[in-house]
């Protein structure tokens, strides 16, 4: 009756123009997924065959059919499932640490499946992303032996890559993670981790299995019911020594909530960060320094933590992000000798970051300050980049020298000696750091591109684009090549959508090569670009038609194609889709739509303020159906606080939110 009551009330939701917010597109530098922090290379796979016999193979779960296990070659060499390696990486987004479980395995397919002929092998990886603190449940500190359990990892996203490119697959995974988080949408798959710690006499083992399930509570809940846990290990599982699995989880470095109030807990992560930094594992070091900042470190440690976060990002060549951390360190007031040393070093390191983005004036000022305060390494940086008197001032502009260095650079460039050309172009830039000529950063970027330094080439091309010449300038046509090269750099980093975006921009500027690039690499992008405006209006009419007919399945499946999620047309679709998603039981999808409205906000006395209020109420109802009663109550109360006068909301709060 409660559910029917809710659904009846939801039919009265007002469908108006809604406010929304488009997900922020992250600026790509390099993948910030960590190095491998924990891995499993060996585990015995056990299967109960249909002849009643248990058999095992290393890193493979044999077939249940015993006859299949006797056959060799083709798919029979793979077993029911297999793995070459299971490893853990992590990534931090918006101060939340996510664990990335990656399973590398072997796969294949037949050209003629029925005849089982012409078998082709390929490598496969599957990845699962979930909040890192789930490991506390997956491997609790207090182990109860000889009793199985199951944990809902509540995965953020998952994916499968066949014949993955070792140079680019981390980009692909990170792109997927960011897109999922920013768009606040989950996939159709969930992952259940089943575990069975075993103690036999003086030996201890850890049995485990990953179960994929449809991401609907009514589907995956069966794995989480205690009376089903024994069944999860009835037919097959992997087995490893308990101590090995304990070490595996220990290497992940999960933040333990019980220790956060310990004033020395941050040192655990700080020291791990130092260790990884020395090994030049900068991404993993950065994750540990971020964790150190998340566990209530004392004020006396904040300068040092910010300094080391910046040093990691500098070595990862994310210079603008490094500057933010150095600024954070420098903005604080040192109170001890140790803090003061870190504070001075932050100036020196910030100078290096400024220099990397060609801000030579600020670089020399920082190095001069650090030299005066005892950082001897600053002298070499000043000597190389600033004036010969070591006063810390930037080298005087010398246009003649700048032009000579540029000419030398072009000669080496024409000879395809890109490394020497790069050095000459950078010298040209230093002697005319106020130059408005796009050619200096453009050719600097091309050299970096040719040397395989695609990340930094992007910075150079973007700088060249900022130095746009007048439309009537003879070099204007050459300047548009900056967009072409910027697209090529994004393409090398497997950011094909960004590449097509830049090439499309070049085409609008009448660049003759851009059309061919779009034709060869961006066919789908071009078609979508051309169709978006007309398609959007058509979708609005389609949505209204299906909603009026009560066809909520079709309405919920509508794809929003508008580029601007804040536009009237797109938000009208969003309003219908949110309601339809609820009607079809896609409560998470409905929450995502209502959340976009709430994030945008609306001022009082505007037509959309009532919509904002209703969105809180609607989202609360959706949360209720997902079992999130606390979240539902918070949203219902917020709706009333903002002015919702519907007595139903007050009745819900009175009935379900007594705490």
Image (cartoon, rainbow, N blue to C red):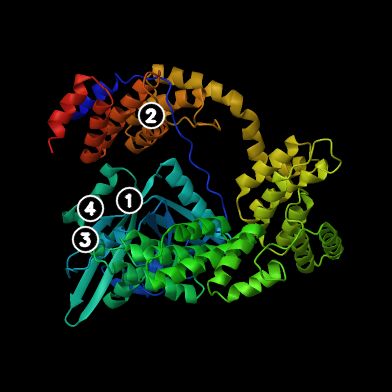
Q: What residue sits 70% from the left and 71% below the top?
A: 389
| Nearer to us in this view, 404 or 635 | 404
Q: Distance between the residues labelled 1 and 3?
A: 16 Å
Q: What residue sits 79% from the left and 37% below the top?
A: 470
Q: Position of residue 143 (x, y in %)?
A: 19, 69
Q: Which element type, helix, strand or loop, lies under badge 4?
A: helix
Mark with earlier residue (1, 2) = 1
Circle 4: is it few (<14), some (14-19), or many (20+) Cα within 10 Å? some
Q: What residue sits 45% from the left and 61% below the top?
A: 329
Q: How far apart are marks 1 and 2 (CA)?
A: 22 Å
User: Residue at label 4?
Assistant: 224
Q: Is residue 323 above or below residue 390?
A: above
Circle 2: is it few (<14), some (14-19), or many (20+) Cα within 10 Å? many
Q: What's the mark number on residue 381?
A: none
Whether pointer 1 and pointer 4 mark residues with C-beta atoms closer than 8 Å, the reply is no
Mark with earlier residue (2, 3) = 3
Q: What's the mark number on residue 149?
A: 3
Q: Where is residue 179 in the image (x, y as percent from the top left)?
A: 48, 46
Whether pointer 3 and pointer 4 mark residues with C-beta atoms closer than 8 Å, the reply is no
Mark with earlier residue (2, 4) = 4
User: Residue at label 1?
Assistant: 154
| Nearer to us in this view, 35 or 331 | 331
Q: What's the mark number on residue 578?
A: 2
Quarter the N terminus occupies: top left
* Of the two numbered discs 1 and 3 in the rendering, the one whose residue sits closer to the viewer: 1
Q: Where is residue 328 in the image (x, y as percent from the top left)?
A: 46, 57
């Amino acid at each position: 009756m409660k559910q029917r009551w809710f659904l009846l009330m939801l039919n009265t939701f007002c469908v108006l123009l809604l406010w929304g917010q488009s997900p922020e597109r992250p600026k790509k530098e390099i993948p910030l997924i960590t190095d491998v922090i924990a891995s499993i290379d060996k585990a015995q796979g056990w299967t109960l065959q249909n002849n009643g016999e248990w058999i095992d193979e290393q890193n493979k779960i044999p077939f249940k059919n015993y006859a299949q296990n006797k056959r060799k070659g083709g798919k029979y060499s793979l077993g029911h499932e297999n793995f070459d390696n299971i490893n853990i990486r992590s990534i931090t987004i918006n101060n939340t640490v996510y664990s990335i479980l990656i399973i590398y395995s072997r796969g294949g397919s037949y050209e003629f499946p029925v005849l089982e002929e012409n078998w082709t092998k390929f490598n496969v990886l599957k990845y699962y992303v979930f909040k890192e603190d789930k490991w506390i449940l997956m491997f609790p500190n207090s182990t109860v032996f000889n009793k199985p359990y199951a944990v809902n990892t509540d995965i953020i996203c998952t994916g499968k890559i066949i014949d993955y490119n070792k140079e680019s697959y981390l980009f692909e995974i990170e792109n997927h993670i960011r897109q999922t988080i920013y768009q606040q949408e989950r996939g159709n798959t969930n992952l259940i981790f089943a575990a069975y710690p075993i103690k036999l006499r003086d030996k201890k083992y850890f049995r485990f299995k990953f179960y994929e399930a449809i991401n609907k509570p009514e589907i995956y809940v069966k794995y989480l019911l205690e009376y089903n846990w024994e069944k999860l290990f009835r037919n097959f599982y992997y087995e490893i020594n308990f101590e090995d699995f304990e070490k595996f989880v220990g290497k992940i470095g999960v933040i333990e909530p019980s220790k956060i109030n310990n004033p020395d807990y941050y040192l655990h992560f700080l020291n791990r960060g130092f260790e990884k930094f020395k090994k030049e594992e900068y991404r993993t070091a950065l994750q540990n320094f971020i964790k150190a900042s998340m566990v209530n470190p004392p004020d006396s440690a904040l300068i040092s933590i910010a300094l080391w976060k910046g040093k990691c990002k500098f070595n990862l060549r994310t210079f603008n992000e490094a500057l933010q951390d150095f600024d954070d360190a420098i903005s604080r007031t040192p109170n001890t000798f140790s803090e003061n040393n870190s504070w001075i070093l932050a100036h020196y390191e910030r100078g290096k970051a400024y220099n990397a983005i060609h801000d030579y004036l600020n670089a020399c000022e920082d190095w001069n300050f650090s030299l005066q305060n005892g950082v001897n390494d600053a002298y070499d940086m000043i000597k190389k980049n600033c004036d010969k008197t070591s006063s810390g001032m930037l080298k005087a502009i010398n246009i003649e020298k700048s032009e000579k260095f540029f000419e030398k650079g072009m000669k080496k460039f024409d000879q395809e000696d890109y490394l020497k050309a790069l050095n000459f172009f950078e010298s040209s830039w230093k002697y005319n750091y106020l130059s408005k000529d796009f050619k200096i950063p453009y050719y600097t970027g091309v050299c970096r591109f040719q040397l395989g330094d695609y990340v930094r080439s992007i910075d150079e091309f973007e700088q060249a684009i900022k130095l746009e010449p007048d439309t009537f300038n003879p070099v204007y046509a050459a300047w548009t090549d900056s967009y072409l090269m910027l697209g090529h750099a994004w393409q090398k980093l497997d950011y094909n959508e960004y590449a097509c975006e830049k090439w499309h921009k070049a085409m609008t500027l009448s660049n003759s090569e851009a059309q061919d690039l779009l034709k060869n690499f961006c066919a789908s992008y071009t078609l979508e670009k051309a169709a978006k405006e007309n398609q959007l209006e058509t979708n609005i009419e389609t949505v209204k038609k299906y909603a009026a007919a009560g066809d909520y399945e079709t309405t919920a499946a509508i794809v929003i194609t508008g580029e601007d999620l804040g536009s009237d047309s797109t938000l009208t679709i969003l309003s219908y889709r949110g309601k339809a998603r609820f009607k079809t039981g896609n409560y998470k999808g409905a929450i995502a739509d209502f959340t976009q409205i709430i994030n945008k906000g609306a001022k009082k006395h505007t037509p959309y303020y009532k919509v904002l209020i209703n969105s809180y109420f609607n989202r609360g109802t959706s949360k209720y159906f997902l079992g999130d009663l606390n979240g539902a109550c918070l949203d219902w109360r917020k709706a009333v606080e903002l002015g919702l006068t519907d007595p139903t909301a007050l009745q819900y709060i009175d009935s379900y939110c007594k705490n």
